[in-house]
Image (cartoon, coloured by chain):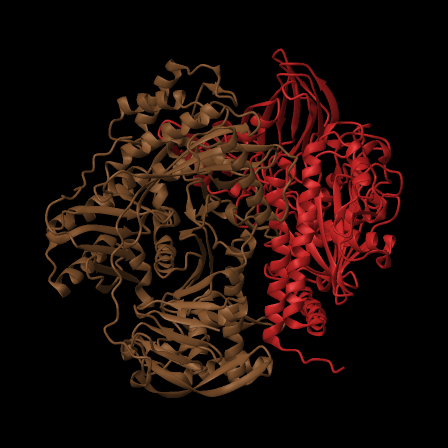
Amino acid sequence: MTSTSHFPVGSETGDQRFRIGVDIGGTFTDGTLVDSVTGEVTTSKVLSTPSNPASGFISAVQKLLSVDSVDPAAIEHVVHATTVATNAIIEGKTAKTAFVTTEGFRDMLEIARQIRPSLYDLQFEKPAPLVPRQLCFEVPERLNAKGEVVTPLDESALAQLVEQIAESEIEAVAVCLLHSYRNPDHERRVGETIAAKLPKVIISLSSDVVPEFREYLRASTTVINSSVAPIVSTYLSSISDQLVAENVTSELLVMQSSGGVYPAKAASENPVFMVESGPAAGAVAAASLGSSLGYPNVISFDMGGTTAKASLIRNGQPNITKDYSVGGAAQSGTGAFGGASGYPIRTPVVDLVEIGAGGGSIAWVDSGGALRVGPHSAGADPGPVCYGLGGRQPTITDANLVLGRLDPDYFAGGEMKLDREAAYAAIRTHCAEPLGLSVEGAAHGIVEIANTAMVNALRLVSVQRGHDPRDFMLIGFGGAGPAHTVRLAEQAGIPKVLIPLGPGTASALGLLVTDVRMEGSATLIARADQVDLAKISSEFERLESLGREAHHQAASASGEPEFERAVEMRYWGQSFELSVPVPKRDSIDQHWMDELTESFHEAHETAYGFRANDEPVELVNLRLTTVGKIARPKMRKLANVDSDPSSSIKGFRQVYFASETGDRGMIDSTVYDRSLLPAGAVFTGPAIVEEPDCTTVIHPEWKVTVDQFGNLSIEH
Amino acid sequence: MTQPALDPIKFEVVRNALTQAAEEMAIALRRSAYSTNVKTRQDFSCAFFDKNLRSVAQAFTQPVHLGSFVRHVPIAVKRYGPENLGPGDMILSNDPYGGGVHLNDISLIGPVYYGDELVGYTACLAHHVDVGGGAPASVGAFREVFQEGIIIPPIKFVNNGNLDQDLFRLVVSQIRSKRETSGDFRAQIASNKTGTLRITEIIDRYGLDEFNLYIDEIIEYTDRRTQAEVDRLPKGVYQAEGFVDNDGFSDDVVKLAVKITINDEGVRFDTSGSDQQRRAPVNSTFAQTFSACAYALRCLMDKDLPVNDGFYRYVHVDAPEGTVTNCVHPAPVVGGWETHVRLNDLIFEALSPALPDEVCAGTKSMQCHSGFGGENHQTGEYYCFLETLAGGYGARSTSDGPDAVQSHGQNTENAPIEETESNYPVQITRYELVPDSEGPGEYRGGLGLRRDYTFPEEATFTILADRDKAGPRGLFDGERGSKSVYALIQNGEEEHLSSKTTVQLKPGDVISYRTSGGGGYGSPKNRESEAVLSDVLQGKISVGRARERYGVAVDIQSQTVDKTETERLRSGT
């Protein structure tokens, strides 16, 4: 409710043609600077500084400014993706927070969902609540499911409660009263009373953060919001101050988990919307790239050193989910209780499936004699065997090296020599000999098994959500992604692949190709055949006025906002809602409702394979996204045009390939230098395309065309 | 035709794809279901069986279905006759005396054909909120299975992809919650259809010969890994006895006995010495007892071990017919899971001397059903609601038992209060931990929980639970957790109820559950005094209890342990 931070909001003067994006990852901090007029992109990579992330941030910015001697006054805005909120939760370093709820429900956070995170583990632990029990308080009051007052708020008990909270020296308070999504009056009163006594404390009300039913999910979201707010707000203020010290006074925007950006001030107040800030950037980059090339339906595949992430983009927008947990075991996407090991949040998050398969994932043979890959990872230290830094167990990177897919002399642009002999020996000892396979066969097995897990991830985001992956283009990026993408497409039956230029930093570019988006929602539970249509209109209008207000606080969002309306619906009696875009009609009348209902039936059939025309349909939540459009930077065309790629051939080498029908073995493959490839060049696999931060593997029977922007467009 | 050679890479790929298919069945079922019990509380399971009815891949949300569901499916298919099932057909069954469990758990099973050839079966089980019988939600104390609801022998429910409307009307007519149950049946059909599609895709890719080859290998692989795990277990004979607190009609405890023999051949569970079956809701079918044993064995093995026929073949169960661990027709079965889950506590207690670091002390170990229903005055519909409540978990050799959590075969979520109040005429007026309910120990048991239901209209309420005589046992000088209390509060007067009873409620009546705490592990006198202090500061344990049961004196003013006094208390002077 209160914020003491002040952020520059930029100015409208001058020629502000540059935009900066900074994405802080576990190992590296990536910076990207785009000239929005020419489309020229400059990147910088510095080591992340986990103990003080702001320091890595500012080095990345300094590096960008110095490379091109950019005038800081010419920066239009700076967009940031950060894991500072998630890290605080994972590391248990959230702010000291109090929780206030309705009398009788103090233990809502302790009890959580009453389930165990793993089924056959007698030694399991429940995640510790983010607020210890002695800081959970009750206030006498009660609403019913219609939002009517059953027990009035007890003002004198509230006054005593505030005294108790004041004594406990907390930094933040989360308030979640039962049924406040229907009627926020009591929550507001509690918030005002605490604020009057404790003006410096950050207060989050559940009816503001996520006014939707199901108390534990709402409470958990609200607690996360308030308990990371002091940390996020301090962090963003510090970054903002340092930018000012570099004479960058333009607006600071933050990437949200949903793929939109919002101003730093809004992020400081509602940080729960940015917990998955980094992964969202990759999906946004893929969405933008796909749309600009005329492919609004794509699957994004982003593979780094420890994990791979897949997400689905339809009509240029990443799929969004609200069924998500933070700080738990890695999400498999299917584990029914995956969420029970973390803290659920109900804010929109790009629907991505993340699996523990990265370049560093370790291969091993289990007690039943099966070859397995992961979940353990050698990470960056000691790293794969071939790094020669002490790693002894073979990894996916070692397998790719043995198969000839990586060049031992051109890793990281030749900065690091890889030890192929050591990788070969490790695979022989740990995998090939126990299984009676050749070393190449075992290495190929390691890659194929990892690919299977990744194909499952692609299927989870597509098939499981009712979409046929063959209708999508696959965009592969991340340091390790392009070595696998073509094979994944082959396995999933996807006919077309795209590898962007500079795949290693493509994700940071996503920060610069999105809009300011503010999410609003309201619960309105009513059957479609009984709902008060006027109420839907007035609720949407109320959400629009809130959205418009927020919009005008974002300098980068010029002009009037656009609004996206959706309704979350289900068959009356179901518990999971589907989000349905509203019909494009001028007024909300019976025709509007009929069309909306039909859209819901269709969406349900797509998702679950059946529709129930005779069943009543129920509206649950209204959702409104306020969009402040930001013009996209121009994409830069390659100067060099030639259909013949032969001038960019670096050489030839033996690379192992297999097909569905059997092994091809080591075959002669052409190696291309990506920086020399001209627009319009056409060539076919088997081939390898190398650039300093990434290697793309082109399997036999796939044809590559270099498009005018330098992307590799690969078709079967 | 030559046998294709086994390829370890393809093996792992096919195995993952099959598991994925089962997972997708579970997701389809959950997300399209209607009843809170299925959609939110996840009381269902899905699996794929091969053409010889061996279980191959499964997606279980509830471990209770682990052994029971995989026994029921083959028996149901054989009874119906696999030759009578064509593409797109599905059979429905819940017959407890045909390999089933209690009537609420209804399985839907369909053959998967690839062209003209039978390649396997997809099956899913859902706990339906109501199947008719003597009380809403079909829970309660009855004398015969006939009073518990509709008994469905294997019948063809879906004919070549089309629901048999006559049978559907017949089944739904027996059921109170018609709309929800109809929705849940549709969700089960969607689940099997999803599974069939996925299996077909896998065969498209690898061909039928390879598909069959890898299914055999998946089972043999699991067998090898299970054997390796069994080899690791300490050989010997281990025994324990215990009881279910009452049977719902008489106050006599129901004795349970278990003897576990671990030798080179595997693990044998013998329940001889358990009481004869009762005309009361405490009888476990063989499938339920088998499931308890399979679950216990699975807990002792590598977390990563797949569960399929290659694992189940190591579970040997001798349960004498006519006892509460293997009841015969027409004994009532609705409370069979109470007996089942108590057997789990006994199994771990029996194994505790041999595996002290792997087991836990006594847990809630009851299903703890809360079922109610009646006419909803607002909608005019007959509604039914069912949920089960958590309790304290047993302590372990190096950690406390978690508070308020489900135990053993049961892992159902709580029903969100706001969702429950939006859909049913009830108000939840209290939902909290029960302080001082833990079993004291060096590591303490978890706390039980309290949940109060207030009814604005008349309703019929059934408690089907246990633990009202004694709380869960401790291990190695750890003490028992508190026992459960079930109370009816009318006009402010509190009356304790039996753990297995049905009551008629008037407007304004309150039913209050306070579930048992978990048993402790090790002597409470050895508990770190700082851990006791932390519990006291959190309000989980009172100052008095800290002193009396743990010998720890807490100075609440300074929020510290009074060390001198604690030393005096603990030295017994």
Residue B188 image offset from top left, x and y in percent? 69, 46
Could you say which quadrant of the image residue B267 lies in? Answer: bottom right
Q: Is residue B68 left or right of residue A649?
A: right
Q: Is residue B494 left or right of residue B338?
A: left
Residue B565 image offset from top left, x and y in percent? 43, 33
Could you say which quadrant of the image residue A521 lies in? Answer: top left
Whether residue B480 appears in this view of the structure is yes
Viewer-proximal residue among A676 and A363: A676
Residue B137 image offset from top left, x and y in percent? 72, 31
- Residue at 46% x, 29% y is A588
Whether residue A388 appears in this view of the structure is no
Viewer-proximal residue among A421 and B103: B103
Chain identifier matching the brown colour in the rendered picture: A
Chain identifier matching the red colour in the rendered picture: B
- Residue at 76% x, 30% y is B140
Viewer-proximal residue among B344 and A585: A585
Total marks in image: 0
Could you say which quadrant of the image residue A185 lies in? Answer: top left
Residue A223 image offset from top left, x and y in percent? 39, 36
Vertical position of residue A132 compared to residue B88: above or below: above
